[in-house]
Each structure stands twice: as structure tokens, then as C-alpha cells.
Amino acid sequence: QVQLVESGGGLVQAGESLRLSCVAPRNVFSRAHMAWYRQAPGKQREFVARISLLNTTVYADAVKGRFTISRDKVKNTVYLQMDSLKSEDTAIYYCNAAMYSGDLWGRGTQVTVSP
């Protein structure tokens, strides 16, 4: 079964940084727009950031200027660098691969930011 595997979550204090990683199979990464979503307790899953096959990036307003998405085609990995974290960034972060044939999702990685 095709899987996206996230890592890098953890517990940090407000103002600190984390970098999330998501590894995809080569045949997925080479033809997918990659994105990060998050879901906070009691809330719906929401878009965080996206990077296209041509490295065009889009960010949610809530993270613009603090988060940076990037992709490494050698490692088949997409990253989410999160700086100046806030308590409201606490959520499970999910990796998404959007392809012509449909979307793939990872299982998520927990990010907890203490005030």
C-alpha cells in the first residue's frame, strides 16, 4: 500500500521552531503537488501550505510569513519549516499528495505548542 510517512512533530514552546518531513514513494513524488494540512482538536482539517511540481507555493493566511514549504526531489521529501510557533498551531499535521489519479494522505504527526 502506498504511504506517505510524516515525521518531525513534537512538543515545543511558543516562539520556537520545528521542521516536519514527509517521504513519498518516488513514483508519487515525481507527479504530485505536495501539501500540508492540519487538524486541531474539535476542528475540521484545514489547509496549511502547498508546493507544486514547479515549486510554486501557497500558504494559508494563518501561517504566511512563519511557515515555509519546500521539496527535495532527490530525497522524495517535502518539508514544512515552522518558525515562531504559536499555541494555536497545535494540531495533527498531515501530508498530502495530489495527483491526477487522486489524493494520498499520511497518518499525521502531532505538533503541540505550549504557551
Image (spheres, grey):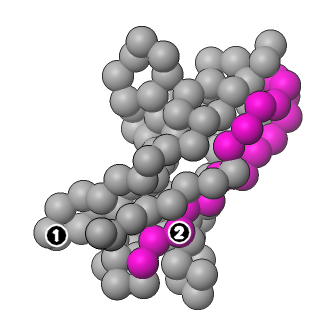
Query: Counting other residues with Cα less than 10 Å from the Cα at mark 1, is it few (<14), some (14-19), or many (20 or more)?
Result: few
Q: Relative to 23, is 106 above or below?
A: above
Identified by mark 2, the residue type is Val
The mark that comes first in sequence, 2 or 1, is 2
Q: Which residues fall within the magenta stretch?
A: 9-25
* Residue on which disc 1 sits: 100
Say if 65 sits above or below 40 in the image: below
Q: Residue at position x 35%, y 53% from top?
A: 105
76 vs 92: above or below: below
Percent x, y for residue 55? 48, 70
Q: Mark 1: which amino acid?
A: Tyr
Residue shown at the point (39%, 31%) measured from the top left: 46
The image shows residue 103 at horizontal and vertical percentages of 24, 58
What is the total number of numbered labels drawn onto the structure image?
2
The image quarter in which residue 88 lies: top right
Pointer 2: what residue? 23
Residue 109 position in % (x across, y down): 57, 43
Mark carried by residue 5: none
Tell me which residue sits at (62%, 59%) in the image.
21
Which residue is more in the foreground, 92 or 54? 92
Q: In the drawing, does residue 87 fall left or right of residue 31?
A: right
Quadrant of image for the N terminus: bottom left
Specify whether residue 58 is in view: no
Query: Position of 74 compared to 33: left or right?
Result: right
Q: Nearer the viewer, residue 12 or 60?
A: 12
